[in-house]
Amino acid sequence: MAELSQFVITGVTVGMVYALIALGFVLIWKSSGVANLTLGQLVLVFSWFTYGILVQVGFPVWVGIPLVILFALGVGWLVERLALRPLIGQPILALITVTLGVAFFIEGLVSLVWPKSVAALPRLFHEEPIYVGAAVVSQEYLWAAVISVILFVLLTLFFKYHRMGIIMRAVADDQMAVQACGVPVAKVFSRSWMFACVLAAVGGILMSSIGGITFGLVGTGLKAFSVVILGGLDSFLGAVVAGPIIGLAENLGGGYLTPLTWPGVREIIPFVIIVIVMFIRPHGLFGERRIERI
Amino acid sequence: MPTGIRSYNYAQDMAIFRTRAHWVWLGVLLACLFTGPLYWGNYWLGVANLIGITIIAAMGLNILTGYCGQLSIGHAGFIAVGAYTAAVLTNRFEMPFLVGLICAGFSSGLVGMIFGIPSLRVKGFYLAISTIAAQFIIIWVINHWTPVTGGFNGMSVPPAQIGRLTFISQGSQFYLIMIIVMIVVFLAKNLSRTRAGRAFVAIRDNDIAAQVMGISLFRYKLLAFFIGCFLAGIAGSLFAHWTGFLNAENFTMMDSILYVGIIIIGGLGTIVGPIFGVLFIRLLQQLITQISPVMEGALPNLPAGFTTGIGPMVFGIAIILFLIFMPRGLAHRWSLVRASYRLWPF
């Protein structure tokens, strides 16, 4: 029983972080229709940048984290301005592959600047674990969940009440109509990339404070794809619900299936879920079912 | 086609090599290619072999993505399926090389078809994601199915052998690989002109319209996946025999992305495209591996990861720049060059 509750708590909290990263994807997809396949590499580069700021330069956490957020905003702006903006209106194949090119570039950049393959962030949270019933949870997990929930709430409020949030929803609904109303749509694309990068950065910091910085963080970003596929590409609610589901499936599966199959089965559970969802319900749990016309 | 050349029957009209000049250029190209082992060193022969293998794989991805429009980011995974099939058959069951080669093609093709089934309902990004999933699942299975694939320890592969001929040296493998490359290029060129090839293009341009016109999406999309992955399997088999030692590290997601980059840089939906793309990427790789130690020697305060990091950065930039400034790739540039040559001095 202790085992079960341990898996459930770990799964749900890690799943929240996946959901956070996935929200960044949904944001870009909804506003500009671009599939951001760079997520994994973005998570990786922001985690390493955090390492660089906090460990190599030695800033305290309360200076370092805002710097990372600023860096993430800058990266988002640059990627959109340099790679995506020139390709507005191009076929979807070009839009997907350009993000792959960015992914390639970032991966090279990371191994150029930080040739170490493994590193650890300094402790951001208290060390002593917390006992929840029979389960022992280290504080990183709980903080990850709390921060994710806070960001969900902030984002929801932003989309509901802030002018930019309302514009973003409008752009997602009908780009032409919004442009006709005099809203600079390109600026909205740029903002959504910046926000997505911040979400990836926060997700990266949370994940690397749990498990250290490795190339596995790219996999964390890729797991966010299974979240968006399961939840539905264009649904914020879908991402928030599907995140913990993926986290749960991963941890429960990893816990109980490993004796039956090979070790390391948890790494591919999200990908197996992708394939199953593709076969059964490709638009996901909450996604909009698209009807195409010629 | 130069002016003044007329076709008097259908066979002439459909011929790939139509004028005497074409045949002469073909002869010169083949002569240069097949005397290559005489004056290229062993190192560059190895590079040429890798280029040949990559051309076969890229040709497959080009049929799938360039002609049929189904984006696949799992090509390295499908190549791995072929490579390991060939390795298991020739190493553990001691089958002949050619049996391994064909079986590698078929096993990759079948695995590709299974992961291609979602393409009937989804496209674009969804398909990209499901092929990424294919990539990870395949590599995971290879890494953990230790009794068969050797797992993380990898597995050794005997050299290719046809009858009494054993292809051990780079020079002998060069002939084997180049002959297969030529067969593949010839078949791909002809495929693009058959009913299936035209159906692929129709599906790429608008799949609903194609379906309305009576093209069975089920049949042709899966056929495209089968052919694309079949060629990946052939390439994988040749790669296995060429390196002699297989490890899942050879087939990462980055390689899959690189294949997409190759056909983008070469030019989607053309036959010469993948060849140009592979030459560009592989020669760029060589340039980087030759130059970066020199640069590290000349500039002592470069960061330590310069050699490993600079390659991916350059490829990423190349992919982005080609997409923005030359979206039709090197193949289009090549056709412009040919046109200006023909029309010279106008």
Image (spheres, helix red, strand yellow):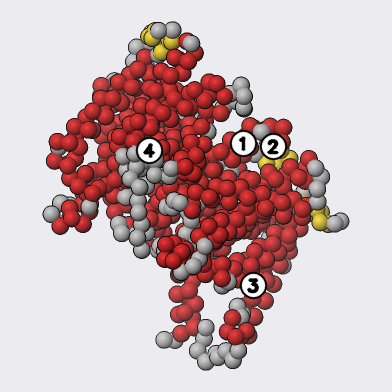
Mark 4 residue type = Leu
Q: What residue is disc 3 on?
A: B29
Instruction: Name the residue: 59% across, 68% down.
Output: B191
Instruction: Name the residue: 60% across, 85% down.
Output: B10
Q: Residue A246: x percent and y percent?
A: 43, 30
| Disc marking residue B141 | 1
Q: Are marks 4 and 2 in contact (CB under 8 Å)?
A: no
Q: What residue is disc 2 on?
A: B149
The answer to whether residue A238 is left or right of residue A190 is right
Task: Give the crowd class for mark 1: few <14, some 14-19, many >=20 residues within 10 Å.
Answer: some
Name the foreground residue: A211 vs B294: A211
Q: Are marks 2 and 1 in contact (CB under 8 Å)?
A: yes
Write down the chain letter for disc 3. B
Write down the chain letter for disc 2. B
Name the foreground residue: B113 vs B340: B113
Q: Residue A227: x percent and y percent?
A: 40, 35
Q: Residue reaching furthest right? A: B164
Q: Residue B235: x percent and y percent?
A: 65, 54
* Disc 4 and disc 2 on one polypeptide chain: no
Mark 3 lies on a secondary structure that is helix
Question: Which numbered disc flags the more N-terminal residue, 3 or 2?
Answer: 3
Q: What residue is disc 4 on?
A: A285
Write down the chain letter for disc 4. A
- Above or below residue A220? Residue A293 is below
Q: How many marks?
A: 4
* Disc 4 and disc 1 on one polypeptide chain: no
Between the residue at mark 4 and the residue at mark 3, the CA separation in whole angstroms equals: 56 Å
Mark 1 lies on a secondary structure that is helix
* Disc 4 and disc 3 on one polypeptide chain: no
